[in-house]
Amino acid sequence: HGPVREAWLAACQSAAPRLQRVPISADDGALLGSLDLSATLQSGHLHWQRGLLAQADGAWLVLPMAERAPRGLLARLTQTMDQGHVQDGQGQRLASRFTLVAMDEADPEDSPLHESLHVRLAFALQLDHVPLQLAQAAPALDPTQLAQVRTRLAQQRQVQSSLRALLEVAASLGLGDARLLRHAWRVACVSAALRGSAPVDEADLTRAIRCVLLPRARQFPSSEEAPPAEAPTPEPPPESSEDATDPPQAPNPDEAMPPPEMLLAASLASLPQDVLDRLLLQAQAPRGPSAAGHSGELRRSLQRGRPLPSRPGRPNDQARLDVLATLRHAAPRQRLRASADPANPRLQLRSEDFHTRRYQQHSPTCLILALDASGSAAMHRLAQAKGAVELLLAQSYARRDQVCVIGFRGARAECLLPPTRSLVRAKRALAGLPGGGGTPLASALELALVQAQRLRRDGQTPLLVVLSDGRANVTLEGLGGRQRAQEEAQAMAKRWAYAGHAALWIDTAPQPEPLAQTLAQLLQGRYLPMPQVQSQRLAAAMDMERQALLP
């Protein structure tokens, strides 16, 4: 919503032949075409009205509130996009080639865009943080320049090495849908046409990977460097003087294309750090019990929340009557009921017609931050974690979410900040925290599990965020012993995963620590390396993990 989106649509309108909106309430008659009743009655002959999909041929089709589009509408849209034509009510095949613009207007607690529509869209634009001045200052697209770009685009040819590089990058990112590869190749061709270059080069492929493939990444390749290839032996110069006088041949684009690893590395290097964090968390699919959802996340309610389909039942002080659903259920039965009682011409309702409203509520989330206060870098971690907690509380007040902080150092872990929404209380509790000492990681996970059980009983959804390098060296009894402390920490991580709670492990080691990765896997949570802890980046990562809990 807002003026930024309207400014973007106005800029698109200068390039698009026309913009046409399709409401999510459109049925098959509106989409495919139906009988024009008024024209039929006036002329006495059948007149058919073209559907929205046939009218959108050659246009940009705008779908508002795309996240709430029903499955029937999505099926018609995706089928038409794949086939390029639509069959109307008379059985005629009409051309329907359009550019779809899906407006995802979902709140953080709403469901995301349907996957069947998401894979058919080339770009995912985030306009939330775009300043209005920047959107209004965007230059308009010149029709003459667009015509030249289209001419150069028609002259593009497929280069096997470029396609092979995109295919290998897509495979390394866990993407196997051929439609995404087609989107990426088209973006690379458009990039080359915009630059005025005929062949697709490395910069075009990097832009296509960054715009199309990376936002959908499901995994990332390992960071191990491949062994350097041996340098090719230089060939001796030609002895014939006739060969030296020949004009130099143009370089073959198949031979000049860099390896896919370099293309992916160049694409990742151009992204901001917060975008990289989001992609890394997005690529780690939830595993285990947490993948199926949590019982405390969604609650059925009869008073407030997101509307659900009504159900049969008598209204009372807790369940309100759904008038439209009641009338819809009673309407087909009126003729039968009128025949049984001809003297009563009024609408006849029965108890079995009554339908009551239902709603779905999202229970509040409590973020349990287990903070490693041991070691030489403890003071820096504490300061940045305190800033992240304050940022989260400032953002979470409207969602009624809470934050709990557990610090562990020395011989045991302690609850530094009980679950709260008070920013003043958090500042007071986190001021002047001590640091240094051993790492009682098992004690911290045990205390976090106790807090999570209390929160679950209160109807809240716990989310554990561990900020540590995973090197436990203090047992549950408060004694030293690295091996036993590590075994106890892993046992507590398994108990957390068995309880079905979500978790995020933020590794603070200078290099990715295998112990931290193992504990993250045992927690059945996600893993994010963050050698330099920053409050804004930490708060963004925790908020992304909180939003991942929502269905």
Image: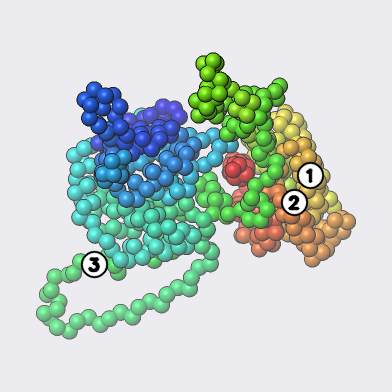
> Which quarter of the figure is the N terminus placed in?
top left
The amino acid marked with disc number 2 is: Ala
- The image position of residue 318, as x and y in percent, is 70, 25
Disc 1 residue crowd, few under 14, some 14–19, many 20+, Cα 10 Å? some
User: Viewed as shown, does residue 56 lie left or right of 425?
Assistant: left
Q: Is residue 330 above or below residue 476?
A: above
Q: Is residue 248 above or below residue 132?
A: below
- The image position of residue 109, as x and y in percent, is 58, 36
**Residue position marked by numbered label 2 in the rendering:** 499
Residue at (52% x, 16% y) in the render: 345
Mark 1 element type: helix
Residue at (22% x, 46% y) in the render: 149
Q: Residue furthest bottom?
A: 239
Looking at this view, is 530 or 24 the one in front?
A: 24
Q: Does the CB distance between marks 2 and 1 fall below 8 Å?
A: yes
Point out which mark residue 453 bears: 1
Looking at this view, is 446 or 252 the one in front?
A: 446
Residue at (41% x, 51% y) in the render: 212
**Residue position marked by numbered label 3 in the rendering:** 251
Q: Does the CB distance between marks 1 and 3 fall below 8 Å?
A: no
Q: Does the CB distance between marks 2 and 3 fall below 8 Å?
A: no
Mark 2 element type: helix
Instruction: Give the spatial CA distance, label 2 vs label 3.
Output: 60 Å
> Which quarter of the figure is the C terminus placed in?
top right
Q: Is residue 466 visible?
A: no
Residue at (37% x, 48% y) in the render: 79
- The image position of residue 200, as x and y in percent, is 28, 58
Q: Is residue 383 above or below residue 221?
A: above
Colouring style:
rainbow
